[in-house]
Image (spheres, helix red, strand yellow):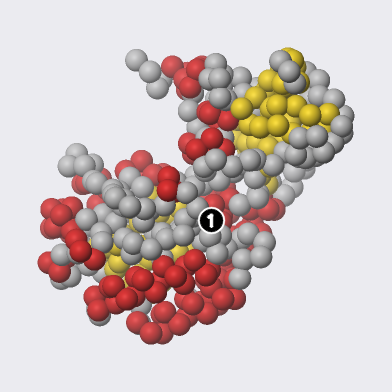
């Protein structure tokens, strides 16, 4: 039965039908290549969708204790946990709930491996590798940038880890195609393949833009199959954005229109607090029924409702003038958005909406206490 409630802006809305299309593409890759795909919670952690997601994917990859607990509690399949550096006061919990633990450096691996094995004898041990090759578009998202802290370079590899490791991980991509993976994979093999003997798996990391239109899925399948056959290992991939890609929006409302040399629409959302990658990347979010400035008749600067001067989404043009109360819909705002939200300036967190195929909605709303309880 269709949900008749009127949703109060701002809210993120994820559409089950679109999410499932992404999952079906990922499942096709799994079935054709033999790879296992796990969800990167750092990119998409809407756990109300996990009943659907876990029908297709093997588990989750977590970036620390809290994500690992969420994976264990709400997903209930494989839990892979990585951190740039684990903490003494968390390692016991992480080892208890994780099926795989991924260390960033030989130092951390050798420090903790005996302890985690005592706590969980069945846990798989892996080391993250930095292949020192990447075509990531900007350094802020480049794990292989100069002086990166993420992963172990060949120079810093310590063969003392070899008796303990079940696998190796690398992560060098950011919303990229299979040709970028091939370049990274070549460097990874050239530098580290002599360490592959006896390993159970290699994890190709995330950043694979598998569900984007035009991605060469068949080529990816061939790359994975060739690698598995060549080295006799399992292959994991851990996409985040490929799961949440183009399956939902951020819906906002116009609160006021001001004029300072051009029309400025102040919205009840925020680039700084609710769409941080649009400022950090930076990139321009698409807006439903809008174009670049001056293409359509009415041009507005869309701006957030915080006191940060630069809390601006950009200039957009519309067929009709905007008025207070009008909806403005930012497209493709389900991955790497709500997982990064802040309550900066005390601005209200957008609600999370999961719209099912039958028209019903699962809605999570946030209020004053969500702001207050982060403070003291």
Residue occupying image coordinates x 62% and y 66%: 215
* 257 or 90: nearer the viewer: 257
The furthest residue to the front: 261
Q: State the image quarter where residue 292 is shown.
A: top right
Q: Is residue 167 visible?
A: yes
Q: What residue lies at 48% left-to-right and 22% top-to-bottom?
A: 344
On the question of residue 239 being in view, the answer is: no
Q: Position of residue 210 (x, y in %)?
A: 57, 63
Position of residue 359 in the picture relative to residue 87 (left or right): right
Closer to us: 308 or 61: 308
Task: Say which of 56 and 85 sits in front.
Answer: 85
Q: How many marks?
A: 1
Q: Secondary structure at mark 1?
A: loop
Q: Residue at x 39, y 59 (%)?
A: 171
x, y (%) of residue 158? Answer: 15, 65
Query: Which residue carries the number 1 mark?
Result: 175
Q: In which quadrant of the rendered image does the C terminus lie?
A: top left
> Residue 246 placed where, x, y %?
65, 50
In the rendered view, would you say 324 is above or below 13? above
Left or right, 355 with respect to 204, comes to right
Is residue 58 rendered to the left or right of residue 132? right
Viewer-closest of 306 and 29: 306
Relative to 19, say whether 87 is above or below: above
């Amino acid at each position: 039965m269709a949900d008749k409630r009127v949703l109060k802006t701002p809210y993120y809305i994820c559409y089950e039908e679109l999410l499932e299309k992404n999952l079906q593409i990922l499942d096709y890759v799994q079935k054709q290549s033999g790879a296992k795909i796990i969800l990167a919670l750092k990119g998409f952690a809407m756990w109300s969708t996990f009943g659907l997601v876990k029908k297709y994917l093997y588990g989750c990859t977590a970036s620390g204790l809290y994500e690992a607990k969420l994976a264990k509690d709400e997903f209930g399949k494989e839990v892979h946990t990585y951190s740039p550096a684990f903490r003494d006061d968390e390692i016991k919990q992480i080892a208890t709930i994780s099926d795989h633990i991924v260390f960033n450096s030989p130092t951390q691996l050798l420090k903790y491996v005996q302890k985690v094995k005592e706590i969980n004898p069945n846990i798989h041990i892996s080391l993250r590798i930095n292949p020192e090759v990447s075509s990531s578009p900007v350094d802020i998202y480049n794990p292989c940038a100069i002086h990166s802290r993420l992963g172990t370079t060949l120079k810093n590899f310590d063969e003392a880890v070899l008796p303990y490791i079940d696998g190796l991980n690398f992560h060098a991509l950011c919303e990229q195609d299979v040709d970028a993976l091939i370049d990274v994979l070549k460097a990874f093999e050239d530098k580290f393949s002599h360490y592959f003997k006896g390993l159970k798996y290699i994890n190709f990391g995330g950043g694979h833009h598998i569900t984007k239109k035009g991605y060469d899925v068949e080529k990816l399948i061939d790359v994975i199959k060739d690698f598995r056959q060549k080295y006799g290992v399992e292959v994991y991939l851990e996409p985040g954005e490929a799961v949440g890609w183009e399956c939902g929006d951020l819906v906002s409302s116009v609160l006021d229109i001001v004029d300072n040399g051009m029309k400025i629409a102040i919205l009840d959302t925020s680039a700084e607090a609710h769409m941080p990658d649009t400022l950090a990347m930076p990139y321009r979010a698409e807006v439903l029924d809008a174009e670049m400035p001056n293409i359509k008749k009415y041009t507005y600067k869309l701006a957030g409702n915080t006191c940060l001067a630069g809390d601006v989404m950009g200039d957009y043009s519309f067929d009709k003038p905007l008025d207070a109360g009008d909806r403005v819909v930012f497209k493709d705002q389900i991955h790497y958005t709500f997982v990064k939200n802040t309550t900066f300036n005390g601005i209200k967190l957008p609600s999370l909406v999961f719209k099912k195929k039958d028209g019903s909605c699962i809605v999570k709303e946030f209020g004053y206490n969500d702001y207050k309880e982060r403070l003291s």
